Image (tube, grey):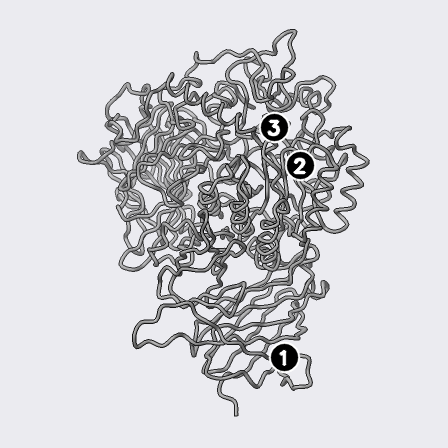
């Protein structure tokens, strides 16, 4: 939630004024070399298999403050695929991401590094089965290599001709660099809106510091901080991927030059984790095994969501539900922004606009048909002595402090305090408030917004005496507190200025003052970018404590590990074609970050989208993992039924999404157990195909379902890249593309989105419906794809089914079923079968497979000799076998023949999903 267009313009103006006042132009040219680095003066083995070293400063430099003279180096292969390199002050404890928030091994205590080495090491290499750490002693530098191919993944060694210097470690300025091969493709380092696409672009700014800056701002630090990147290289036709995480929550600039990467961090420690890969999927698996696997999601969260800031009363919400029903557009979840609140206070209901008895009756009605209701919660707690949430918080001492008093800020309720989620008492208080609110109104999930944290004022503020705040008739986002800038501490005015908001604004601008402090004296300066992460953890704990159900949380601000607790949306975007295009890159990035349940506001948050744009946006948004239409109160209404043409596109695209729900839900299970993104860049499945390394206008759902949308105004066709192989249109399975690796121009009139399924897949689908509760009970169909005209081929897929109300998403609890699906083609003989694990739950649900379609079969003859579970199917059976020719969109060179294949469909089946089945038939000329 943000404001009208005027608000965003005002914010941009303020940032512009500040940029002129504070900094002048911000340069991403080669930085000057600051220090001469450190020398390694001792190194020894540790009892747990690591190595411990002591680094001594070579020469002092005054730039950005005094150097720390002695550093402790700790290196350990935590797994064969994960290497940790930890560097900190050897004599004084420094701030790190709290170990209780992101559980991990503790490095040795500092005292162990002082004095003579107990078990000195003379070798300069330290290996696991997959990674090698090596170092030079003077000046100290280190190299990380992959053992299997000897590729250098990270190299901090400097030379006189290079663009960067040696490692620098000061109290408020840390710098380290790595060399990179020029042909490496990098992804990650967010959150930001990347105009050049998903691939990092040399000399673009990458600043990490959580900020309430609208997603319309390109190449600036936005709502989340994810200091991790994936590096994909093609070496001799083979693809190799790895990742590097700098686990540090302080603000930082990352300078990517194409052949080097430099971190400039304003605090904390160097805590690097390297993940060996070598496939992109393996990298994300290794990364999420460390930061936390993505949260299990309820089935209904994969349905379509409708929201708007400006549903002013319950009658409007009821009308929206009814109008979706009339338009026959699927809808699972209704959302309200702060409209349901009593004067914008968290955990309250407006007695006038959302009276509790009527709201409860509405919820009872939608819950009976399987629909859900989610509401917003902002972190700022309104200061009001008659407001129980505030008084209980004050009594429990849960708020962030400044000068020994709760820090005063302003958000939508007016004057507020911010809960300190680093404080265990705050987490308990918050969980209790969630419980109290759920008893007031049984919401199905919570939307936590403004948690960067956003503040409409800056500095140290007081409530003006004798004046209302907010003032009547003045927009609520205008600061009405009496405030003074805080510049007298090194936390509010650090020696190095990161490129905050793209213009080097002060760190405390429109957020919590960085000299404010949390539990145990932790500075906001250090913990700032963790705020949304800690609120997600507390909210998850609160929701999980209610009736033991699976929580659903949507958070705007995220950090490393947020995906373990929450979904994410990409924030306040614009209803423009550029924003539609950029949304794909941001969604794909969050899959790499370990937050696979992600989407953008469909049709744009503000201002009014055109009718054509909204048509095209729902054709993309229907395939976001998280699919929600959301708009600003100042924009015209943009529910999908507002235009008949958009309603048609919505019925078409969402109709397909609801048929794909079993596939999407199985992908959420795969994400939960392995981190695999739901929406993926094409290079995840085609890592050796370099043409797709920078592709940001198409994406995959899972390993083989490709979305190729129209992203430009006035276009009725789309030029789509097809990696080598056979691709089959999901909307019309008789249409196919047999690609050698090329762009193909596809017809795409207004209501059409091109979705293609790759060869060697088995896709589970159902019949769809208006609500996911109904859709998931309809009969299944399986779509099997072979390479066109192949004589020998295989295909596979899977289905995961469970009771999605349960907190855990797992096998072995009696409330879940997992099905492996297989198909083979061998010399004209086709076989399709399943292997079921724990079939009891699926059998109890009465789920059946009604149809099997096999695509890409040799078109020289028909199908015959059908057997199902060992029994020959006769003509008197209800089971039917049909054959349809497939058409290929391809350019045929002289002397070449067009590809020919057929689709065989088996109808009238009644195969229990929870029981193994097998079917087979033969292809060939019939007598």
Image position of 535 with respect to 620: above or below: above
* Residue 100 makes an appearance in the image: no
Query: Which residue in the protein does label 2 denote?
Result: 336
Label 3 crowd (10 A; few <14 / some 14-19 / many >=20):
many
Marks 3 and 2 in Cβ contact (< 8 Å): no
Determine the residue located farthest toward the left in the rendered image: 161
Q: CA distance from mark 3 to mark 2?
A: 16 Å
Quarter where residue 872 is shown: bottom right
Task: Please name the residue shown 50% across and 19% down the image.
Answer: 513
Query: Which residue in the protein does label 3 denote?
Result: 379
- Of the pair 143 and 390, the residue shown nearer to us: 390
* Residue 868 makes an appearance in the image: yes
State the image coordinates of residue 21 (x, y, percent, origin top left). Answer: 38, 16
Task: Please name the residue shown 63% across and 15% down the image.
Answer: 471
Q: Earlier in the sequence, mark 3 or mark 2?
A: 2
**Secondary structure under badge 3?**
loop
Q: Earlier in the sequence, mark 1 or mark 3?
A: 3
Choose mark 1 or mark 3, whichever is in front.
1
- Of the pair 910 and 835, the residue shown nearer to us: 910
Quarter where residue 833 is shown: bottom right
**Secondary structure under badge 2?**
strand
Image position of 389 with respect to 408: above or below: below
Q: Which mark is residue 682?
A: none
State the image coordinates of residue 273 (x, y, percent, origin top left). Answer: 40, 42
**Secondary structure under badge 1?**
strand
Label 2 crowd (10 A; few <14 / some 14-19 / many >=20):
many
Q: CA distance from mark 1 to mark 2?
A: 48 Å
Marks 1 and 2 in Cβ contact (< 8 Å): no
Compared across the picture, whether 897 is left or right of 763 comes to left
Query: Which residue in the protein does label 1 denote?
Result: 880
């Amino acid at each position: 939630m943000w404001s009208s267009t005027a608000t965003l313009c005002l914010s941009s103006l303020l940032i512009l004024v500040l940029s002129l006042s504070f900094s002048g132009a911000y340069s991403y040219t080669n930085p000057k070399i600051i220090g001469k680095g450190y020398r390694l003066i001792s190194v020894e083995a540790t009892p747990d298999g690591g190595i411990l070293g002591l680094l001594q400063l070579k020469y002092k430099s005054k730039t950005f403050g005094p150097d720390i003279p002695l550093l402790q180096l700790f290196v350990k292969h935590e797994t064969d695929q994960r290497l940790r390199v930890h560097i900190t002050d050897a004599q004084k404890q420094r701030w790190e991401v709290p170990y209780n928030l992101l559980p991990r091994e503790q490095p040795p205590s500092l005292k162990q590094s002082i004095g003579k080495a107990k078990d000195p090491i003379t070798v300069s290499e330290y290996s696991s089965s997959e990674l090698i750490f090596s170092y030079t002693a003077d000046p100290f530098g280190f190299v990380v290599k992959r053992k299997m191919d000897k590729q250098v993944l990270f190299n901090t060694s400097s030379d006189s001709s290079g663009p960067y210097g040696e490692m620098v470690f000061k109290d408020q300025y840390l710098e380290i660099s790595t060399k990179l091969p020029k042909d490496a493709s990098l992804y990650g380092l967010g959150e930001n809106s990347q105009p050049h696409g998903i691939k990092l672009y040399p000399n673009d700014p990458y600043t990490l510091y959580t900020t309430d800056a609208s997603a319309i701002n390109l190449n600036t630090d936005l709502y989340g901080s994810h200091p991790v990147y994936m590096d994909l290289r093609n070496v001799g036709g083979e693809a190799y991927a790895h990742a590097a995480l700098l686990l540090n929550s302080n603000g930082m600039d990352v300078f990517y030059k194409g052949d080097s990467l430099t971190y400039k961090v304003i605090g904390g420690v160097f805590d690097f984790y390297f993940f060996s890969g070598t496939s992109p999927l393996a990298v994300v698996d290794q990364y999420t095994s460390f930061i936390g696997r993505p949260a299990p999601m309820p089935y209904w969260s994969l349905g379509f969501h409708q929201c708007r800031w400006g549903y002013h009363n319950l009658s409007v919400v009821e009308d929206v539900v009814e109008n979706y029903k009339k338009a026959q557009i699927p809808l699972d979840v209704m959302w309200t922004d702060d409209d349901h609140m009593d004067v914008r206070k968290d955990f309250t209901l407006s007695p006038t606009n959302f009276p509790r008895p009527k709201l409860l009756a509405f919820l009872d009605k939608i819950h009976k048909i399987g629909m859900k209701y989610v509401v917003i919660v902002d972190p700022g707690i309104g200061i009001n002595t008659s407001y129980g949430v505030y008084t209980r918080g004050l009594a429990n001492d849960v708020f962030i402090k400044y000068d020994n008093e709760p820090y005063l800020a302003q958000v939508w309720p007016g004057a507020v305090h911010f809960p300190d989620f680093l404080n265990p008492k705050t987490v308990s208080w918050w969980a209790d408030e969630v419980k109290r609110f759920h008893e007031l109104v049984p919401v199905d999930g919570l939307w936590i917004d403004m948690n960067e944290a956003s503040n409409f004022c800056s500095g140290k503020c007081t409530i003006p005496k004798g004046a209302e705040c907010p003032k009547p008739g003045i927009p609520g986002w205008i600061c009405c507190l009496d405030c003074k800038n805080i510049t007298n501490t090194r936390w509010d005015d650090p020696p190095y200025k990161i490129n905050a908001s793209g213009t080097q604004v002060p760190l405390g601008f429109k957020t919590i003052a960085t000299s404010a402090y949390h539990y145990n004296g932790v500075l906001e300066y250090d913990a700032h970018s963790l705020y949304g992460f800690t609120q997600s953890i507390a909210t998850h704990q609160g929701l999980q404590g209610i009736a033991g159900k699976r929580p659903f949380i949507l958070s705007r601000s995220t950090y490393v590990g947020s995906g373990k607790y929450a979904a994410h949306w990409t924030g306040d975007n614009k209803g423009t074609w550029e924003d539609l295009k950029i949304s794909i890159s941001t969604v794909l990035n969050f899959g790499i970050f370990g937050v696979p349940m992600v989407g953008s506001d469909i049709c744009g948050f503000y201002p009014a989208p055109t009718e054509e744009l909204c048509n095209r946006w729902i054709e993309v948004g229907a395939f976001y993992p998280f699919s929600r239409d959301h708009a600003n109160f100042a924009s015209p209404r943009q529910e999908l039924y507002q235009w008949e043409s958009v309603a048609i596109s919505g019925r078409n695209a969402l109709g397909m999404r609801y048929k794909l729900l079993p596939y999407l839900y199985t992908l959420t299970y795969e994400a939960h157990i392995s981190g695999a993104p739901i929406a993926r860049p094409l290079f995840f499945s085609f890592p050796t195909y370099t043409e797709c390394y920078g592709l940001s206008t198409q994406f995959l759902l899972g390993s083989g379902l490709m979305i190729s949308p129209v992203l430009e105004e006035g276009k009725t066709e789309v030029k789509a890249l097809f990696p080598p192989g056979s691709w089959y249109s999901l909307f019309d399975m008789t249409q196919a593309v047999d690609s050698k690796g090329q762009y193909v121009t596809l017809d795409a009139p207004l209501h059409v989105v091109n979705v293609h399924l790759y060869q060697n897949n088995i896709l589970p689908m159902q019949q769809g419906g208006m609500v996911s509760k109904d859709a998931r009970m309809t009969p299944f169909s399986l779509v099997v794809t072979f390479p066109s005209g192949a004589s020998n081929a295989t295909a596979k897929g899977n289905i995961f089914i469970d009771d999605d109300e349960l907190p855990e998403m797992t096998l072995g609890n009696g409330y879940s079923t997992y099905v492996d699906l297989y198909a083979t083609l061998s010399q004209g003989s086709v076989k399709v079968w399943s292997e079921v694990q724990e079939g009891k739950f699926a059998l109890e649900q009465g789920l059946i497979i009604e149809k099997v379609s096999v695509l890409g079969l040799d078109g020289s003859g028909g199908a015959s000799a059908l057997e199902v579970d060992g029994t020959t199917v006769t003509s008197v059976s209800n089971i039917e076998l049909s054959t349809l020719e497939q058409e290929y969109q391809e350019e045929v060179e002289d002397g070449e023949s067009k590809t020919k294949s057929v689709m065989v469909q088996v109808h009238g089946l009644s195969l229990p999903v929870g029981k193994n089945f097998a079917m087979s038939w033969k292809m060939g000329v019939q007598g």
